[in-house]
Amino acid sequence: MRFQGKNVLVTGAAGGIGRAIVAGFQRQGARVAAADLQSVPLPVEVMLEGDLTDPKFADTLPGAASAMLGGLDIVCNNDGIITRGKITDTTDDDYHRTMAINVEAPFRICRAAIPLLAASGGGSIVNTASCWGLRPGPDHPLYVMSKAALASLTQCLGRDHAHQNIRVNAVCPNEVDTPMLRTGFGIRGIDPDSGIADLNATVPLGHVASPEEIADVVLFLASDQARYLCGALIEAHGGKPVG
Ligand SMILES: NC(=O)c1ccc[n+]([C@@H]2O[C@H](COP(=O)([O-])OP(=O)(O)OC[C@H]3O[C@@H](n4cnc5c(N)ncnc54)[C@H](O)[C@@H]3O)[C@@H](O)[C@H]2O)c1
């Protein structure tokens, strides 16, 4: 029960990794405010439905979670979209939407959450970045640059707010078996199960990550066991870095 008495905000909570993060925190005693665009009923204390491209929703989310939970200790910026295709295939709308969801929303949420965490003596922020933001994977320049920005934001805030006892870190997965990964196969006309099986064979540990394997890293980073980590970018890739 590492998180007994802790109040947690998780974005992208209805997605593959988000659900595993929420379930992990709950199993270990936390009270959770779950935020997502999708109106999926989750068994959480607070469900905050809204679009993170709306600046007002993002700006007010930590305050709303804190008011409804009775405080805020941990924030997980886990929302995200993947925009595929070479730069010549992408539109202005692709650019603005990718940056709004993957970068601007975590920026706004961190900016609003830090004073709340500081006022209660400190806390932890865990961002879901990507291996693909640390080194460039092919044919996803918008996604890669957005995750690189999130990784950089993590390092900056990890440094700037450590003195307030606020630790900001990120998990950087490679492929994870979630709807985000599976829709890519559908678009290319590949059966998602056989696509995952082919990808499994490319990972030295033998399988792409399960959502729970990534959630476990998030929970570690949020916990006291990671008390000396600030601005860390933890790659979780089963031995398969982006090459
Ligand atoms: N699946 C992978 O292979 C993989 C790899 C590395 C990093 N990631 C990152 O992990 C995080 C979670 O991804 P996932 O694989 O669980 O994907 P997912 O698509 O299952 O979940 C993403 C969630 O974000 C929510 N979301 C999207 N746009 C939103 C908006 N405008 N407002 C509010 N919520 C919005 C979606 O509704 C969804 O529930 C993302 O940041 C993603 O970039 C995923």
Image: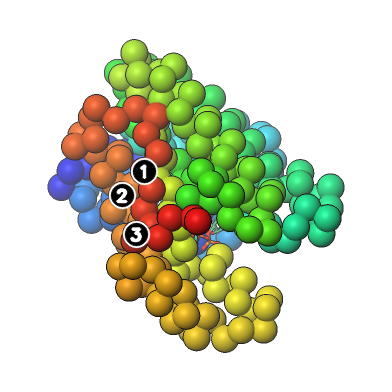
Residue visible at 31% across and 49% down in the picture: 217
Residue visible at 29% across and 30% down in the picture: 229
Q: Position of residue 75 (x, y in %)?
A: 41, 37
The residue to which callout 3 is attached is: 239
Q: Position of residue 237 (x, y in %)?
A: 38, 57
* Marks 3 and 1 close (CB-CB < 8 Å): no
Query: Marks 3 and 1, Cα distance to the nearest angstrom?
Result: 13 Å
> What's under tag 1, amino acid-wise?
Ile
The residue to which callout 1 is attached is: 234
Which mark lies nearer to you, 3 or 1?
3
Badge 3 or badge 2: first in the primary sequence = 2
Q: Is mark 3 within 8 Å of ligand 1?
A: no
Q: Is mark 2 within 8 Å of ligand 1?
A: no
> What's under tag 3, amino acid-wise?
Gly
Query: Marks 2 and 1, Cα distance to the nearest angstrom?
Result: 8 Å
* Marks 2 and 1 close (CB-CB < 8 Å): yes
The residue to which callout 2 is attached is: 217
Q: Which is more toward the observer, 18 or 119?
A: 18
